[in-house]
Amino acid sequence: MRPPVRTRPAALLALACLVLSACSGSAEDPPVTTSPATASSTRSEVTVPEAADPVDAALAGMDRRAQVAQLFVVGVQLDDLSPGDDLVADGVGGVFLAGRSRAPAAELAAVTGRWASGAPGPRPWVAVDQEGGQVQALQGPGFDRLPAADEQGQLPPDRLAALAGTLGAQLASAGVTLDLAPVADVVPAGTEEGNDPIGAFGRQYGSTAADVVPDVRAVVDGLAAHGVTATLKHFPGLGLVDATTDEVAGVTDPVTTAVSEQVTAFGELARSDAEPFVMVSSATYPRLDPDAPATFSRRVVTTLLRGFLRFDGVVITDDVGAAVAFEDVPPGDRAVRFLGAGGTLVLTVDAEIYPEMLDAVLARAEADPAFSATVDAAVRTALAAKARAGLLQQVRAPAR
């Protein structure tokens, strides 16, 4: 076993306390303004000229509703992917392939290819849960059976790298561009069975950050080598809880602080050159923010993750559509509160509540200039990630 990561608790804790006290949940980020490229023509419809900044070029062809739609990843059941056609035509930011499927990779590629060609603007993310073990959505021809993370973590580094590369290649062959994996949570040795969301299913790569970080990095790099973006989950960590937020409300981790081992592991991994996404946990962490679950916590998302850990990429929710953790929060408020906390992409497995969420964000942005600026920043972050992934295509701007 590798030696545990050694931190400087006193110094880090002092800095974390300074950062956390300097930025409360009521603080607002400086407004971020957009500068859409302009185009002039006497024709009714023109193609936006190629711009130095592909995000500016994309924004030039999008009205406000289209921009906000980019902030949502919406679920479609794998046993009937046809509703995805309407979502993509409506300009949704991404489609999540929910459930399990034994369909061949080539069959899925035909559907995802149709979505890519049919998108009115930026192509959608095609997301899936492909971790291994009991969490493997795609199981048909063209997809190897993946061992659980705790088994992957026992492989020699070269074999784990090969497995991760194969995983990336197989997902790419089906048109999947976003894997909601790997799990970066640290589950202490001897507590696995009591850690219901992660350890009980062997979803962890190890019991210390020193074990977890190199293995998770290998998976992130293997996916990236084939153009698939990884997602580190579930920040700031689910390794110390005893229930899953999908099934239980009020899940709490009373131990984790800004300098806990699993938090520093996320920070190290999130700054990878492969630029993975970070999925935020739906649990509550009283020592970080006693007043809100991490999903809605500005102290967790903006102060800790973006400030203290210096992550400036995409932050995505865990499912906020069907999870019991949010059943008492109106769907529109779930989206508004997450974006207000500094998040980027709202994931809902329940497609029926997506219109309500979209309308709520639009209404709040129209009424609140500060929130509108926050949305601007989220849209730019989302589109910049698509630019890196090759998902921005030429869009058309209305005549002026």
Image (tube, rainbow, N blue to C red):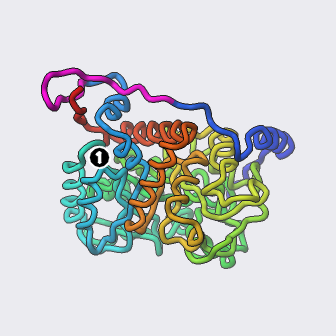
Q: Residue at x 34, y 45 (%)?
A: 66
Q: Residue 88: give x, y in percent of width and height.
A: 27, 54
Find numbered disc 1 in the image and state the secondary structure of the residue it sits on: loop
Instruction: Based on the picture, tell me whether residue 42 belongs to the magenta stretch.
Output: yes
Q: Is residue 212 above or below residue 46?
A: below
Residue drawn where x is 66% and y is 53% of the image: 297
Left/right placement of residue 279 relative to residue 189 reads: left
> Which secondary structure class fits the magenta region best?
loop
- Which amino acid does the dot numbered 1 rest on? Arg
Residue 285, percent from left and from top = 72, 60
Front in this rendered view, residue 153 or 135: 135
- Which percent across, then down, holds residue 22? 77, 38
Residue position for label 1: 123
Q: How many residues crowd around disc 1 within 10 Å: few (fewer than 14), some, or many (20 or more)?
A: many
Asked if residue 394 is positioned above or below residue 134 in the image, the reply reads above
Q: 214 or 366: which is nearer to us?
A: 366
Residue 10 image offset from top left, x and y in percent: 86, 43
